[in-house]
Amino acid sequence: MNTNEQAARGLVDIEAYLYRAAHLSAARRRVAAFTEQTDGLTHAQKRDIELWYLEEQKYVARLVTKHIADSIGAVEAANRVRFGRWLRGTLIAMAVITVLTFVCTAVVVGSVT
């Protein structure tokens, strides 16, 4: 892997980290606002709710990421199949054109002599 590829990968990793941090920060704000509005919760209960909510958000984010990766994999597989069919069709067409060229050349040469 060259320097440009390493830098690009590093930028993707940094972007993913920043996105994850922003998502968790927003989740913390949402759950903090919820627990502040709810009366009668002890500090331990609020902390438990916050921890559960953040873990649930991480779990959902992993599920979404896995679903996206699976979808991308399925699309890539479909594109590989489609390209393989196109390539096979092109190869067959080129073979037919080559055979027809030889046949036509043989007919022309045969008719001249």
Image (cartoon, rainbow, N blue to C red):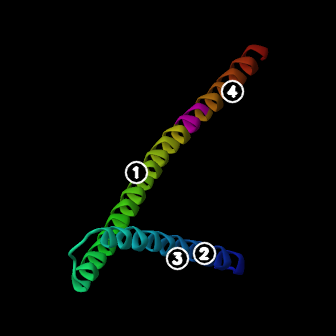
Residue at 51% x, 71% y: name it: 22
Mark 3 or mark 4, earlier in chain: 3
- Residue type at the position of mark 2: Arg
Q: Which mark is residue 9?
A: 2
Relative to 100, does residue 47 appear above or below in the rendering? Answer: below
SS for callout 2: helix
Residue at 52% x, 43% y: name it: 83
Q: Which residues are magenta?
A: 89-93
Q: Which mark is residue 101?
A: 4
The residue carrying mark 1 is 74
Label 3, label 4: how far apart the Cα atoms are: 60 Å
Question: Which quadrant of the structure image shows residue 93?
Answer: top right
Is there a contact, CB below 8 Å, between mark 1 and mark 4? Answer: no
4 or 2: mark nearer the eye: 2
Q: Which mark is residue 17?
A: 3
The C terminus, quarter of image: top right
Mark 4 or mark 2, earlier in chain: 2
Q: Nearer the viewer, residue 92 or 20?
A: 20
Where is residue 19? Give x, y as percent.
52, 70
Is-magenta flag for residue 50?
Answer: no
